[in-house]
Amino acid sequence: MENLEPTDIIEKAITSGETALNEYDAKRLLSGFGIPVCRETIAKNQDSAVAEAIQIGFPVVLKACGTNLFHKTEVGGIAVNLKTVEDVREASERLLKIDACEELLVQEIVSGGRELVCGMTRDEQFGPCIMFGFGGIFTELIDDAVFRMAPLTLADANAMIRELRTQKLIDAFRGEAAVDVDMLSKVLVAVGKIALRYEQVLQIDINPMKIKPDGQLVAVDALVVLSDQRDDAPDHFNEPITVETSYPSMEDNLIPLFEPDSVVIVGASAAPGKPGHEVIRNIRANDYQGELYLVNPKSGEILGMPVHASIGDLPEKTDLAIIILPAAICAQALRECAAKGIEHVVISAGGFAEVDDSGAKIQQDILAVLQKHNIRMLGPNTSGHISTPYHFTSTFFPLGKIKRGRVSYIAQTGNFATHTMKYILSAENFGVARVIGLGNAINIDESAALKYLAGDLETDAILIYLESFKQPKKFLEIAREVTPVKPVIMLKSGSTEAGQRAAIAHTAAMAAEDRLVDGMLRQAGIVRIWDYTHLILAGKALSMASLPQGNRVSFLAPSGAMLVVLTDLCTRLGLEVPTLEPQNLQRIQDISPSFIRMRNPVDIWAAASTKGVEFGYREGMEAVLKDSNIDAVVPILMLTKESGIPSYDFIVELARKYPHKPIFVTFSGEKQYMEECKEYLEKRGVPTFPEIEQPFEVLSILARCRSVMERAKHNKE
């Protein structure tokens, strides 16, 4: 057989009009990138099959091989454990009669019962994605696979291996050695390199990748699907991914959006309740200190402020324009802003690409103006943004004064800067630094927003609601720089199976959109959540408490049933409920009746009922907070008039005494006292949660934040 380089193998196949490499050439391609493959050779007929089998050594495997023969098992195209010349002759005769069989592959038998699969598929949105999972003929039935975007680091590959549900297959198993994890990681990285080096490679399947009894790996079968396009690009798989945009350094030019010294509202209204009126009220309610101009063709006065008839009549160029006009005339307003030298704009109107084709045409007109004049725009179809450090907001929903805080939100939904923000302001006791409503994100997308918040000194943590990605590769690149230093939490909606695909490889067939999203977020160090409520609860926790150092929790409950149920919950959430150190366990025992055997979690009511509610909770909480095995504490307060309502100062004092161990308070009892407790504690920096499961759910999220931040820091080092 001719000895071809990987590029030559691909070029030869494409020149011949082939849509996939035959198995032999597929393995030679893999081998060229350091992926171990089994010993094998090609035979054209029975006689050459016999000769090659003798050369390899019996027993052997014989496979039907052909350009369009992809799944050999389904057509009976494999003969195994052939021990003699006659076995090979008989099998050769049968296999050569199979439709699409062009030649035979004579292969050594690889021992080992454990099988893996790895591969690559190209997604329209996410680009080349690497898959790893349980292999063999039951790959899709077992459905245990994880994905990452190329390029992979060795740390990415190691994380994929750890996430497999059937991970125990990789450990020592039934007398066979544990897999060589370093080699397996290098295989996954190599698959990513092939994808980035050769754009003509559409799909790769290595299935099975066998684990030999000594733990070594070998690719037993491989499929490489090709496009018909040539690639003359240089070898660039070690270079960072770049994404072309219309604007150089686009993420670095958002400061005027969040720190505008002058603002014009185009479409200002004198009618209360209209967006053009409420945005003025919001800006004034937040004590904005810059110049505020109003534009409306009717001129006159609104809320005691003069109104200009047109943008051209403004006395000076402004830092920011808020356009609240019907969609059809937004492009013209944008041109007038450009003529005035305005470079930053918010367009709040709806009626664009999210509605119909005519709206999409208007949106294209707007994009053309933005590109021509290098304008940065938030929206369209956005509810605006909030920047409390600068006492400013562009939202038109009647919010009034917005509380300042240390967390920021990116939201691809109009409701966050509107009624969700209203709920936070009216029902919660924390504030925000920035809120960015992306809208249709035709100019400022999630990547630009994340890049801005990454460098924002006012933002300690970032929470995101997203429905789709504009630039997944760019987002991943930015997120990997952010997550080692700031926790990033995302609720990604639309987690449905991908649409129908014409996929002949297992990898592509299993690449549901949500799996790709999940893999990308893990790769980026972003903690994924699934409940909208957790955007608020996690935001509160991050505003009032530090991240726990780990996932070890103690909780104090007034009920034995709660101890059992919540311990089960902790296990499901990935939280540990560890044994306490002897001296701390003894302290809890000392304050409790002798007939109760104390442990973690803590049955606190016996102590509280005999020695006083405040005494019992205070002493019990301090005992577990002192414990080096504990990272966070959840007291479940029973609040009823009959049992006594304690002063809550001791909880505030303990939170300040142990600042690195979050205290998350929840309650049982009378709603009146629960609400009073929430108000008292949260105004003093201690977060509370009305439902008993919630503090554990949030602790699980924050513990994952700590874990991925530590891992991201380690990987960068």
Image: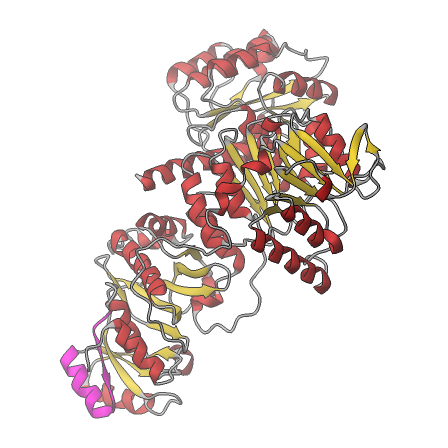
Residue under the point 28% across and 73% down: 7
The percent position of residue 539, horizontal first and vertical second, equals 58, 32
Position of residue 204 relative to residue 541, above or below, is below
Q: On the rendered structure, is 534 left or right of 177?
A: right
Residue situated in front as seen by the camera: 353 or 141:
353
Residue situated in front as seen by the camera: 135 or 550:
550
Farthest left residue in view: 55
Residue situated in front as seen by the camera: 549 or 386:
386
The percent position of residue 97, horizontal first and vertical second, equals 35, 92
Residue under the point 52% across and 24% down: 545
Residue situated in front as seen by the camera: 66 or 203:
203
Q: Is residue 592 visible?
A: no
Is 156 inside the magenta-drawn segment? no
The percent position of residue 51, horizontal first and vertical second, equals 16, 87
Q: Tell me the magenta residue range.
A: 37-56
Q: Quadrant of residue 712?
A: top left
Residue under the point 41% across and 75% down: 227
Q: On the rendered structure, is 261 left or right of 227?
A: right
Q: On the rendered structure, is 271 left or right of 710?
A: right
Position of residue 17 relative to residue 604, above or below, is below
Q: Assign the N terminus to one quadrant of the image.
A: bottom left
Is 43 inside the magenta-drawn segment? yes
The percent position of residue 351, horizontal first and vertical second, equals 73, 55
Q: Quadrant of residue 259?
A: top right
Q: Is residue 578 visible?
A: yes
Residue under the point 70% across and 45% down: 348
Q: Assign the C terminus to one quadrant of the image.
A: top left
Give the colouring mode of the picture.
secondary structure
